[in-house]
């Protein structure tokens, strides 16, 4: 199998960097009470641009999972070594997520109440799951496995009764607290769930199953990108397959709504299709049209995504809640002081909130750019 060209790898770095920068943008507003609608998650069913960020990242994880494994096979690494690397990398990603959730480590009770699900734990679990389910067997068998995951999740969430509730899941799916996924989260992880809900988790146990499907779609795309076919054929294939997946997802939405918090099967198909179309568009711009002068910012973010995620997460905890300063005799978080003084003092609420978020993104760009110039790339 041919090795992907540098231009194609550039497109992948651009796409990954855009998702990471987008994550920092939506996670760090100046004020949670003043956000432009596209920068908020959908209330429940439906989607906004913000709801694309996480599945896009899982999709690119799937692509690089395949390309990395093929590169190691080309170097002569045996399957055992590749498997050990997958398990080690996935376990480290999950561990980093738990450490971030537990920060700061005092008081000790916070560790006993640590949120077990989360973004990084889901990334690690989806990475391991997708890598294992696509290691062996034909593409046809792997596609059948994906279909079984998505249909099995749909069946469980809509047709099975929910313990303690009246009716099947389809009648309860619009209530975050009453779905089968929420019941399983409470049964197995009570006390370790998302603090904003406590009764269910947007990265819960059952909804991680279709998230593995998102990463598998990325693996399939990675196989296609590394197939050695002419570039035009690959791009056409990605545009066509992506459009078809989006259409199927929108059709499934009629009976199993697109929903990020539940990571519904329709959400998997729709966002996976949109990710394929987006990557194909970037490749058309960078590989066919040779327009690359706009990519530097995103490449910088794409080279060190783990540094950006962990570093920004730690920084956000510090400035939003932990580090406070005295203002007129009151203890005020550093973030609030910066937001009010630098932005809210002369901009409207939403503009000020967005300006703070953009400054947060630019701060981390400068950090990542400094690492890039020194050739420092942190790989799990």
Image: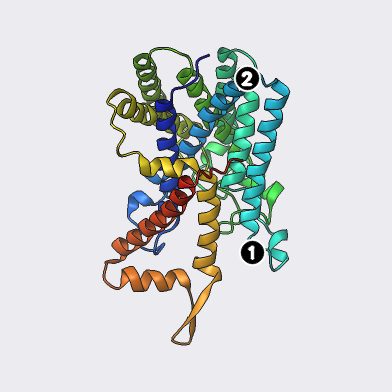
Q: Is residue 234 above or below residue 156?
A: above
Is residue 133 positioned above or below 48 on the image? above
Q: Which residue is mark 1?
A: 104
- Percent x, y of residue 175: 51, 48
Q: Is residue 30 positioned above or below 80 on the image?
A: below
Q: Under tag 2, what secondary structure? A: helix
Residue 366, percent from left and from top: 42, 54
Examine the rendering and report whether any part of residue 144 can be seen: yes
Quadrant of the rendered image containing residue 300 = top left
The C terminus lies in quadrant: top right
> Mark 2 sits on what residue?
73
- As helix, strand or loop, the secondary structure at mark 1 comes to loop
Of 108 and 297, the residue lying toward us = 297
Q: Is residue 165 left or right of residue 214?
A: right
Residue 246 lies in what quarter of the image? Answer: top left
Label 1 neighbour load within 10 Å: few <14, some 14-19, many 20+? some
Res 229 quadrant in image: top left
Query: CA separation, marks 1 and 2?
Result: 41 Å
Give the label, 1 or 2, closer to the camera: 2
């Amino acid at each position: 199998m041919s090795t992907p060209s540098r231009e194609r790898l550039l497109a992948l770095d651009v796409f990954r960097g855009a998702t990471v920068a987008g994550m920092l943008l939506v996670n760090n507003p100046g004020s949670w009470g003043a956000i432009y609608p596209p920068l908020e998650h959908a209330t429940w069913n439906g989607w906004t641009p913000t709801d694309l960020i996480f599945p896009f990242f899982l999709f690119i994880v799937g692509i690089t999972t395949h390309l990395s494994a093929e590169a190691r096979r080309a170097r002569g690494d045996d399957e055992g070594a590749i498997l050990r690397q997958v398990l080690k990398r996935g376990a480290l990603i999950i561990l980093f997520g738990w450490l971030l959730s537990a920060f700061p480590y005092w008081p000790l009770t916070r560790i006993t109440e640590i949120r077990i699900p989360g973004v990084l734990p889901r990334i690690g679990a989806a990475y391991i799951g997708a890598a294992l389910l696509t290691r062996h067997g034909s593409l046809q068998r792997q596609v059948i496995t994906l279909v079984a995951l998505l249909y099995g999740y749909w069946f469980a969430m809509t047709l099975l009764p929910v313990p303690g509730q009246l009716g099947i899941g389809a009648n309860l799916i619009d209530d975050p607290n009453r779905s089968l996924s929420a019941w399983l989260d409470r049964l197995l992880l009570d006390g370790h769930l998302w603090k904003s809900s406590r009764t269910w988790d947007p990265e819960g146990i059952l909804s991680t199953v279709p998230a593995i499907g998102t990463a598998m779609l990325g693996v399939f795309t990675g196989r296609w990108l590394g197939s050695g076919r002419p570039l035009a054929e690959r791009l056409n294939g990605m545009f066509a397959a992506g459009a078809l997946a989006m259409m199927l997802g929108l059709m499934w939405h009629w009976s199993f709504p697109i929903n990020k918090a539940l990571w519904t099967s329709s959400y998997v198909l729709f966002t996976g299709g949109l990710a394929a179309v987006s990557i194909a568009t970037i490749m058309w711009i960078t590989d066919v049209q040779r327009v690359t002068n706009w990519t530097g910012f995103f490449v910088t973010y794409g080279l060190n995504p783990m540094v950006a995620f962990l570093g920004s997460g730690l920084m956000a905890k510090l400035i939003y809640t932990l580090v406070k300063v005295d203002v007129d005799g009151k203890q005020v978080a550093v973030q609030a002081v910066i937001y009010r003084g630098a932005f809210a003092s002369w901009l409207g609420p939403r503009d000020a909130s967005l300006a703070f978020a953009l400054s947060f993104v630019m701060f981390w760009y400068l950090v990542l750019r400094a690492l890039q110039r020194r050739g420092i790339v942190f790989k799990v």
